[in-house]
Image: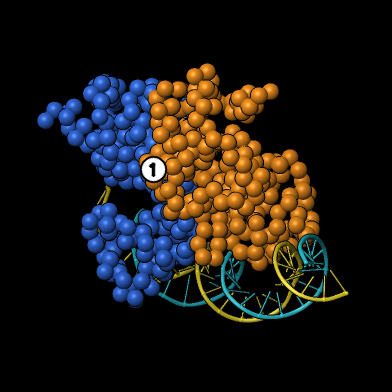
Chain colours: A blue, B orange, C yellow, D cyan
Amino acid sequence: MDNFHLLFSKLTHFKEAALKEELFAQAKFLSFNKGDVIVKEGQYVRFLPIVLSGAIRVFQQNAEREFSLYHVKSGETCTMSLAAAYFNNKSVSNGIVIEPTDVLVFPAAFITEWQLKYPSWNQFIITMFRKRYDEMINTFKGVVFEHINVRVLELLQRKVVENKSNTLLFSHQMIANELGTTRVVISRILKQLEKEKKVKLFRGYIEII
Amino acid sequence: MDNFHLLFSKLTHFKEAALKEELFAQAKFLSFNKGDVIVKEGQYVRFLPIVLSGAIRVFQQNAEREFSLYHVKSGETCTMSLAAAYFNNKSVSNGIVIEPTDVLVFPAAFITEWQLKYPSWNQFIITMFRKRYDEMINTFKGVVFEHINVRVLELLQRKVVENKSNTLLFSHQMIANELGTTRVVISRILKQLEKEKKVKLFRGYIEII
DNA sequence: ATCCTTATGTATCTTTTGATACCGTTCTAT
DNA sequence: ATAGAACGGTATCAAAAGATACATAAGGAT
């Protein structure tokens, strides 16, 4: 299978032959490693990324803490970049690669152009906005209405489904960064969950029961 | 000034003459009173609202609490409705009118159709998505990184700017509902702010100093 | 005037979360 | 092998927020 078909086997949203050709013609392929910074809050965004494989974590931070807004996975784009790139504006969030990741990037100008020309591109954009809204509102609800212990357990259960595995390669610090709290708090809660026979703790990973 | 021009004096985003005509042809005018429910979480959304005057509060709730995501004001639309209406899906939030409000509503089908035909409509849609993201992320940051006393003061200061007045007609309960906490907590914090000479408290309103 | 609702003030107690500190263990790089 | 970093456990104390209860006052309706 050549690159063209490999690419579109992962990007099933796009229907129009002309769109596919344009996508292929304009795309730059980029590969990133774990820890690479894609964008920092305050930086200008001039390119729209679409993830082919791997994952990017989009998060907010202050001096002591971080919390995740969402993860961008295969076939998805980052609506924060989209909203910024469209107006040649600054990013309001940070994006960092959390596993080896292949990305396509497109110059921002095409976002609008293709929206007007290709219904499936437009649908892709709106679908992404919708998906991120849903994710953010759920996170929001968690933060406002739930205690951290509940949020930790829900996060773990969600990841079990996503990863199709009961063993999650998370350090306590990573969980703290997802949820906007500190490592000590997470360790305390995980220990309690272990007492309740809901998880088993190991160095560098957690088993959900 | 006839209705047509009155309408578009408030909706300055829309440039194309043909779009204006279509908007006018397809729109239904609706008037709401304070307290009217526009949409409830879980309801299907089949129409896109654009506010002409007044304001709609979009919020989440559980058994005991509420918190606001954003307010939809003159010239704006609700991106939550947009995302839902586009896919003929259910609303993930609640919308309630907080002052007498005039609204235009359009059948959902036109959202896409006009996006493909009219660049200024498309820009309007993306602008709204961007604006709501910014608002939600700021709220988000507040919830995760700031204590409630800071969030209360920031809310009041923001409203002073928005309303162009140092006197805000807010009850303590309203502030609690904005921020996702309880009346008692807000009363306690406001009293503290009063001691610090940052506000003056009255029945039914607050003066910001 | 009387009753009812809404708004606010405040005290008390509990729970949750945060901050700090210190420890031992495991892994990695040299 | 050894040093240093990353990881996790836990104790102690402080602060923030929540829950509950009760009181007073203002405003509206009849």
Q: Residue furthest left?
A: A1
The image quadrant of residue A193 is bottom left
Q: Where A42 falls versus B119 (above or below)?
A: below
Task: Say which quadrant the N terminus of chain B sits in.
Answer: top right
Vertical order, B168 against A8 (above or below): below
Give x and y (percent) for residue A2: 13, 28
Residue at the location (24% across, 35% down)? A12
Tell me which chain the residue with mark 1 is part of. B
Between A149 and B75, the residue placed more toward the observer is: B75
Local crowd at mark 1 within 10 Å, few (<14), some, or many (≥20)? some
The quadrant where residue B175 appears? bottom right
Residue B60 seen in the figure: yes
- Give the x, y percent position of residue B85: 42, 41
Q: Secondary structure at mark 1?
A: loop
- Residue A42 in view: no
**Observer-nearest of B39 and A113:** B39
